[in-house]
Image (cartoon, rainbow, N blue to C red):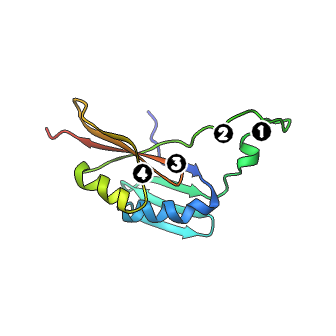
Amino acid sequence: MSLLNRILLPIHPSSLPIVTRFLTEALSLPLHTESEGHATFVANGSTRLDLVGDFDVTSAARDDAGVGVGAIPPPPTLVFTVRDMDSCVPLCINHGASMSSPIKFPAHGKVATVEVEGVTIGLYEPNDG
């Protein structure tokens, strides 16, 4: 069995302070360290999320020979479990996010997707019980 303990998320350097502020203020994710070009969050005591502001659009869209290979793949989605979707979504929007999908109600709880500075964030509120 493996244990996920670190997530590296490269983002555009100009988006780093905006996404950092969003994660701390809208989602209450504890900021562990922050420096120019880097922010580290520690969740659940052991899982580390590193935002790295070194995303190079020109190299991301080229193969090893320097030939353009088409569209840049989207960044990974971060998914957070929230206690109250109905208060979390407006808080996210007030902190600069936009809705990527409406709140949906599958059998296991509520789900929604927001986007801030090109970073997709999934929100999940499990059903009680």
Asked if disc 2 and disc 3 are in contact, CB closer than 8 Å, the reply is no
Q: What number is the disc on residue 7?
A: 3
Measured Cα–Cα span from mark 3 to mark 1: 24 Å
**Quadrant position of the N terminus in the picture:** top left
Between label 1 and label 4, give the one nearer the viewer: 4
Q: Earlier in the sequence, mark 2 or mark 3?
A: 3
- In depth, the one of 92 and 81 nearer the eye is 92
Between label 3 and label 1, give the one nearer the viewer: 1
Rendering coords of residue 29 (x, y %): 38, 60
Between label 2 and label 3, give the one nearer the viewer: 2
| Residue, disc 4 | 98
Q: What number is the disc on residue 72?
A: 2
Q: Earlier in the sequence, mark 4 or mark 2?
A: 2
Measured Cα–Cα span from mark 4 to mark 2: 21 Å
* 10 Å crowding of disc 1: few (<14), some (14-19), many (20+): some
Q: Earlier in the sequence, mark 3 or mark 1?
A: 3
Q: Earlier in the sequence, mark 1 or mark 4?
A: 1
Query: For the residue marked with disc 4, what is the amino acid?
Result: Ser
Secondary structure category for the residue under label 4: strand
**Residue at horizontal 63%, vertical 64%?**
37
Measured Cα–Cα span from mark 1 to mark 4: 29 Å
| Residue, disc 1 | 62
Between label 4 and label 2, give the one nearer the viewer: 4
Rendering coords of residue 94 (x, y %): 36, 62
**Residue at horizontal 19%, vertical 39%?**
127
Query: For the residue marked with disc 3, what is the amino acid?
Result: Ile
Would residue 82 be found to the left or right of residue 64 on screen?
Answer: left
**In the rendered image of this protein, does residue 36 appear above or below residue 13?**
below
Numbered circles on residues, count: 4
**Quadrant position of the C terminus in the picture:** top left
**Residue at horizontal 54%, vertical 50%?**
118
* 10 Å crowding of disc 4: few (<14), some (14-19), many (20+): some
